[in-house]
Image (cartoon, helix red, strand yellow):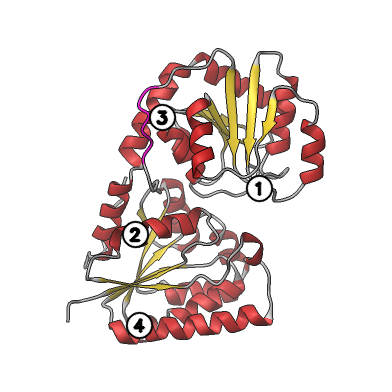
């Protein structure tokens, strides 16, 4: 029997950054004989992720047993797995990967974001289980900053693979609108910076429009009251792929002024694929992502900082838009992501100094 590689993936629903990338992995590798897949997702909505219940515990036990069955049936030489950044989650992940640990199979661990490092430092249980799981592993991270953080906090080497998009944009050239069109496509809350963005646009004396799309994390009433009566601010609700495409095609600038911890936001990659200059905060990988294609807000920004950023992007528009197209093509295309992932999955010797960019 051909040597197999077992991939534990959390597939949508719900659709968020990690499940989006997992779907890309599954769809691009599922027809290849050397790969075997098992879906470890235990939630159907984003609201379920943080909830604890007896039914959820039982479902996770069934998923664990199914993962073990997939392991013993496929007899893999290597296992690809995700890790959680919570105490309950790392216990679950440890149990799912227990056969691979016991039988000394190499693990490839994909860390999606920066929330791992605080809990690794604050929880002895988390640190113990993480170290046991990662003892014989290769670790994949999202950017150079995360690679450095993994080395500094966990004393572990890692590979960098940039996130990607399921489907490329067809746009190659942009022409700025006469009235500057700014868009925000993400979940809505104070912590995501949505309300501060609205206040900035309301204070902006120039001819500018803001279009907002997304579901509410919180602060729905305050948001709707804030935009009520604003002629140049529109809220269109949740944006499916078709609506999102129309928004990105018709907009000039993409904003993600998040105050939350971020990883490598798919929304920013999507915006770059349409040639949009980016205004965002220095969270997670964002500083690396928007270098030469956008404006980085200061940590404790105010609405006037947002307007300063919009003015800079407006004045430097053509250059930044061209850079956005180029950066996407060089770093974030799907074929490159899949090729890099496969090279790690099939590699026998771990080159700790390798960075896939």
Q: Earlier in the sequence, mark 2 or mark 1?
A: 2
Marked residue nearer the N-terminal end (1 or 4):
4
Mark nearer the N terminus (4 vs 2)? 2
* Helix, strand or loop status at disc 3: helix
- Labels 4 & 3 near each other (Cβ < 8 A): no
Above-or-below relation of 347 to 273: below
Of label 1 and label 3, which has the lower sequence position?
1
At horizontal 74% and vertical 22% (from top left) the residue drawn is 231
Q: Residue furthest left?
A: 1
Looking at the image, tell me whether mark 2 or mark 3 is earlier in sequence order.
Answer: 2
| Residue at the spot 23% in from the left edge and 71% down from the top edge | 34
Looking at the picture, tell me which residue is in the foreground, 287 or 92.
Answer: 92
Q: For the magenta stretch, what is the residue range?
A: 168-173
Dot 3 alpha-carbon crowd within 10 angstroms: few under 14, some 14 to 19, many 20 or more: many
Mark earlier in primary sequence (4, 3): 4
Residue 190 lies left or right of residue 117; in this view the side is right
Q: Residue at x 62, y 45 (%)?
A: 238
Task: Calculate the distance from the C-alpha at mark 4 to the C-alpha at mark 2.
Answer: 21 Å
Return the residue at label 3: 324
Task: Establish if 314 lies above or below 256.
Answer: above
Q: CA distance from mark 1 to mark 3?
A: 26 Å
Which mark, residue 132?
none
The residue wearing badge 2 is 27
Inter-mark Cα distance, 1 to 4 = 38 Å
Q: Which residue is mark 4?
A: 71
**Residue identified by numbered label 1:** 215
């Amino acid at each position: 029997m051909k040597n197999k590689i077992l991939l534990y993936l959390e597939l949508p629903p719900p659709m968020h950054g990690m499940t989006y990338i997992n779907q890309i992995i599954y769809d691009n590798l599922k027809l290849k004989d050397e790969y075997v897949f098992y879906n470890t997702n235990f939630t159907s909505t984003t609201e379920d992720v943080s909830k604890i219940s007896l039914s959820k515990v039982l479902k996770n036990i069934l998923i664990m047993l199914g993962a073990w069955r997939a392991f013993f049936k496929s007899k893999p030489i290597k296992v690809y797995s995700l890790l959680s950044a919570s105490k309950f989650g790392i216990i679950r992940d440890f149990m799912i990967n227990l056969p691979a640990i016991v039988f000394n199979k190499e693990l490839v661990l994909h860390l999606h974001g920066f929330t791992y490092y605080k809990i690794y430092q604050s929880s002895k249980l988390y640190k113990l289980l993480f170290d046991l799981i990662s003892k014989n592993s290769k670790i994949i991270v999202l950017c150079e900053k995360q690679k450095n953080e993994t080395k500094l906090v966990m004393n572990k080497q890692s590979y960098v693979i940039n996130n990607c998009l399921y489907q490329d944009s067809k746009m190659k050239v942009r022409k700025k609108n006469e009235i500057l069109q700014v868009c925000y496509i993400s979940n809505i809350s104070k912590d995501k910076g949505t309300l501060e963005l609205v206040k900035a646009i309301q204070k902006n004396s120039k001819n500018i429009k803001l279009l907002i799309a997304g579901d509410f994390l919180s602060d729905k009433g305050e948001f709707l009251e804030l935009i009520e009566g604003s002629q140049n601010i529109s809220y269109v609700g949740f944006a499916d792929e078709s609506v999102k495409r129309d928004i990105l095609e018709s907009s000039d600038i993409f904003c993600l002024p998040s105050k939350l911890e971020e990883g490598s936001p798919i929304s920013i990659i999507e915006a770059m694929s349409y040639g949009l200059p980016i205004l965002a905060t220095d969270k997670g990988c964002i500083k690396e992502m928007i270098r030469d294609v956008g404006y980085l807000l200061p940590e404790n920004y105010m609405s006037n900082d947002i307007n300063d950023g919009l003015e800079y992007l407006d004045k430097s528009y053509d250059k930044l838009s061209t850079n956005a197209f180029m950066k996407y093509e060089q770093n974030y295309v799907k074929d490159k992501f899949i090729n890099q992932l496969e090279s790690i999955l099939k590699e026998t010797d771990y080159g700790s100094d390798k960075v896939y960019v």
